[in-house]
Image: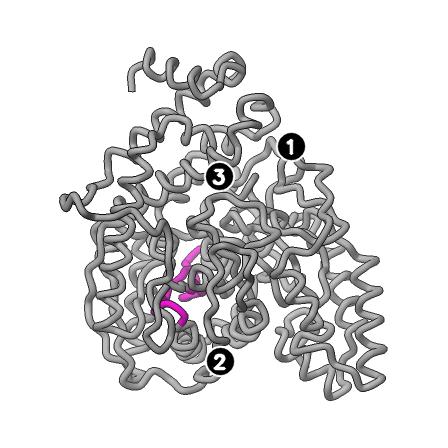
C-alpha cells in the first residue's frame, strides 16, 4: 500500500470513502513528516498544526455522520504566504508585513475550504513573490527536496518543495512571471497557471495587476484538474474575473492525444535561449512520446523570448512600483536586497514605456491566438536548466531568467509545467504545455497523456 | 542611463532615503529599467491600441470580453 504522505487528493478522498484511511490519520502522517523533514526544507513559513488537526477531527466526524462537504473533504492544502488565510499573518515573506493578520480568507482559500479542504499553514515565497532565494529575509528560503543544496524554484517555493517532499497533497501558488511553473519545474510536480481571470485573485497580495494569476499545484495531473474545478469561478469583486462557464477539467483526462495537433515552439530553447543539453533531450523525448501516442506535431514560431520577457518586465515593474512606492520611499531598509532592487525598477520607467509594452502585448496575444487556431496545444520549454545550487548566487542569477514562462503571463493563456524526467545529477527536468483560453481540459488531456507514458507521477525524491 | 539622470529620476520618484542608504541598489534598478525598455519593438501602426490592458481573448463557444 502506498504511504499516506504520497497519496494525492483524489486517492485520499477515495481512501476516506472506503474507510481505508481517515482524515486524522492522514493529517497525523503529514504532521509527522513535516516535523521530520521541514527543518531542512523550510517549505513552511507558518505551520498551523493545531487548527489543521482540529479541522481533520471535524472532517472525520462529518464523514462518520455521512456528511461530505465537497470533493476535497478532509484533504490538507498548503497556502503560499501572499494569500490571505483568516486569522494568520500574510507576511509576503517580508519584514514589512510580519504582523499583517488577515481578516478573511482569500476567495481561492474560501473555495477550497468550502470543498472540504483543510489549511495546513503558510508556505515560503520570495519576498512579495519576486526575486529569488534570499538569506536576508525573516525566514530561511525553501530548499529543493531532490537535493537541499539546490533551490526549489520560485516564487511559490514552499508550495513546490512541500509537494515534492510529500508534506501535503495540494498547494496554492501564484504566477506573475512564472512563479507556479518554476517550482513545478524545479521540483518535478505539476503547476498550472490558469487562463487569466479564471481564478479570483481577491485576498492575494498583488505583484502586478494585469499579470497576476492564482494556480493549483499538485503531484499529478488528475489532482490539478480536480483542484482547478474547485478554484475556478466568477468573482464580481475581482476586476479581472471572467464569467466563464464552469469547465469539466477532468472530463478528457484519459482520452489520449490521438489526432490532437501540438505545436512545438523549438526556437525558445534552441536559439532564443539555448537550453542545457539534458533539457533539450528531455523536450525532444516528450515530443516523440506524444507523437507515438498519436498526436500530430509541427513547429510553431512565436515572438522571441527576450521580447516577451521585456514586455513582462516593463509591465510588472510599472505596476509593482505603483503598489510599493510608498514603502520604498519611507522604509527601503525593510526590504531584502533582491526585492528592493527589482521593485525600484519601476521608478525609472515612464508612462510611455508602459503604454508601448501594453500595445506590443496585444500584438503578442493575437500572435499566440493565431498559433492556437492552427494547433490545439503548444509544447515548449519551461526552465532551460536544472535548478542551480542555492548557495551560488551567480548561478542562481544566471539561470533564473532562463525560462519560457513569462510569454504566457503576457498573453494570459493557460500554461502547465511538469516533470519531463531527471537530469544526470538527479534533479527534475521540465516541459510546458500551453492551451487556448479557458480550454484547460485539453491542456490536462495532453499533460496526462505525457504523465502516463512518461511515468512522471511516480518520481519522488530520495528523502 | 547616465548617473546625473539616474539621480534626478530617483529624487523625482522620492527615493532620497534609498539613494542615501542603498545607492548601488538604486543604480541597479535604473540599469534594469533601461535594459527592458530597449528590447521592446513598439507597433509601427499608430492605431495599435494599448486597451484593454489585459483580456482573455475568447470564451468557449466563441464569446469574447
Q: Which residues are magenta?
A: A416-438
Q: CA distance from mark 1 to mark 2?
A: 41 Å
In the rendered view, does A306 fall on the left or right side of A128? left
Query: Looking at the picture, does residue A341 appear above or below residue A10?
Result: above
Q: Are marks 1 and 3 in contact (CB under 8 Å)?
A: no
Circle 1 marks a residue in which chain? Answer: A
Q: Position of residue A80 (x, y in %)?
A: 61, 52
Q: Earlier in the sequence, mark 3 or mark 2?
A: 3
In the rendered view, does A59 fall on the left or right side of A287? right
- Viewer-nearest residue: A453 or A348: A348
- Residue position for label 3: A131
The C terminus of chain A: image quadrant: bottom right
Q: Quadrant of residue B38?
A: top left
Q: Does the image show residue A426?
A: no
- Residue position for label 1: A96
Q: Earlier in the sequence, mark 1 or mark 2?
A: 1
Q: Which residue lies at the image location 20% right of the left edge and 51% below the top edge? A: A271
Q: Which residue lies at the image location 33% right of the left edge and 29% below the top edge? A: A350
Q: Does the image show residue A18?
A: yes
Task: Name the dominant secondary structure of the magenta segment.
Answer: strand
Circle 2 marks a residue in which chain? Answer: A
Q: Which residue lies at the image location 38% right of the left edge and 39% below the top edge? A: A398
Crowding at dot 2, Cα within 10 Å, few <14 / some 14-19 / many 20+, comes out as: some
Query: Looking at the picture, does residue A327 appear above or below residue A86?
Result: above
- Residue position for label 2: A248
Amino acid at each position: 500500500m502506498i504511504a499516506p504522505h504520497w497519496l494525492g487528493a483524489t486517492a485520499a478522498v477515495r481512501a476516506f470513502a472506503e474507510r481505508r484511511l481517515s482524515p486524522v490519520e492522514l493529517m497525523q502522517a503529514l504532521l509527522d513528516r513535516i516535523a521530520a523533514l521541514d527543518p531542512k526544507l523550510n517549505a513552511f513559513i507558518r505551520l498551523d498544526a493545531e487548527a489543521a488537526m482540529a479541522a481533520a477531527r471535524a472532517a472525520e466526524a462529518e464523514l462518520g455522520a455521512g456528511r461530505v462537504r465537497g470533493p476535497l473533504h478532509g484533504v490538507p492544502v498548503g497556502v503560499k504566504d501572499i494569500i490571505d488565510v483568516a486569522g494568520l499573518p500574510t507576511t509576503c515573506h517580508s519584514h514589512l508585513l510580519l504582523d499583517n493578520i488577515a481578516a478573511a480568507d482569500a476567495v481561492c482559500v474560501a473555495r477550497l475550504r468550502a470543498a472540504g479542504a483543510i489549511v495546513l499553514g503558510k508556505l515560503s515565497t520570495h519576498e512579495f513573490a519576486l526575486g529569488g532565494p534570499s538569506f536576508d529575509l525573516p525566514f530561511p528560503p525553501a530548499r529543493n527536496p531532490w537535493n537541499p543544496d539546490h533551490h526549489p524554484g520560485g516564487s511559490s517555493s514552499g508550495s513546490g518543495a512541500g509537494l515534492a517532499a510529500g508534506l501535503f497533497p495540494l498547494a496554492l501558488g501564484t504566477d506573475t512571471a512564472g512563479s507556479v511553473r518554476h517550482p513545478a519545474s524545479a521540483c518535478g510536480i505539476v503547476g498550472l497557471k490558469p487562463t487569466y481571470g479564471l481564478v479570483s485573485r481577491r485576498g492575494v497580495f498583488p505583484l502586478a495587476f494585469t499579470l497576476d494569476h492564482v494556480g493549483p499545484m499538485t503531484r499529478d495531473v488528475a489532482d490539478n484538474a480536480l483542484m482547478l474545478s474547485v478554484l475556478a469561478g466568477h468573482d464580481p469583486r475581482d476586476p479581472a474575473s471572467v464569467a466563464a462557464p464552469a469547465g469539466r477539467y477532468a472530463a478528457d483526462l484519459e482520452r489520449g492525444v490521438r489526432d490532437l495537433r501540438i505545436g512545438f515552439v523549438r526556437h525558445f530553447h534552441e536559439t532564443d535561449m539555448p537550453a542545457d543539453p539534458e533539457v533539450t533531450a528531455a523536450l525532444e523525448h516528450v515530443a516523440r512520446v506524444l507523437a507515438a501516442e498519436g498526436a500530430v506535431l509541427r513547429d510553431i514560431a512565436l515572438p522571441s523570448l527576450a521580447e516577451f520577457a521585456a514586455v513582462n518586465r516593463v509591465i510588472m515593474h510599472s505596476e509593482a512600483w505603483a503598489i510599493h512606492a510608498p514603502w520604498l520611499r519611507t522604509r527601503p531598509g525593510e526590504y531584502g536586497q533582491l526585492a528592493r532592487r527589482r521593485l525600484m525598477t519601476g521608478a525609472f520607467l515612464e508612462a510611455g514605456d508602459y503604454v508601448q509594452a501594453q500595445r506590443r502585448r496585444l500584438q503578442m496575444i493575437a500572435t499566440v491566438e493565431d498559433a492556437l487556431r492552427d494547433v490545439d496545444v503548444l509544447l515548449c520549454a519551461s526552465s532551460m536548466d536544472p535548478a542551480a545550487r542555492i548557495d551560488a548566487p551567480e548561478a542562481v542569477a544566471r539561470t533564473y531568467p532562463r525560462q519560457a514562462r513569462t510569454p504566457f503571463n503576457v498573453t494570459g493563456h493557460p500554461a502547465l509545467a511538469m516533470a519531463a524526467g531527471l537530469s544526470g545529477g538527479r534533479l527534475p527536468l521540465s516541459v510546458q504545455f500551453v492551451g487556448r483560453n479557458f480550454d484547460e481540459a485539453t491542456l490536462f488531456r495532453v499533460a496526462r497523456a505525457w504523465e502516463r507514458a512518461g511515468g512522471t507521477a511516480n518520481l519522488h525524491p530520495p528523502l | 542611463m547616465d548617473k546625473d539622470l539616474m539621480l534626478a529620476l530617483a529624487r523625482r520618484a522620492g527615493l532620497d532615503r534609498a539613494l542615501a542608504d542603498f545607492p548601488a541598489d538604486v543604480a541597479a534598478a535604473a540599469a534594469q529599467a533601461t535594459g527592458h525598455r530597449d528590447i521592446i519593438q513598439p507597433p509601427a501602426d499608430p492605431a495599435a491600441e494599448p486597451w484593454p490592458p489585459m483580456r482573455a481573448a475568447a470564451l468557449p463557444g466563441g464569446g469574447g470580453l
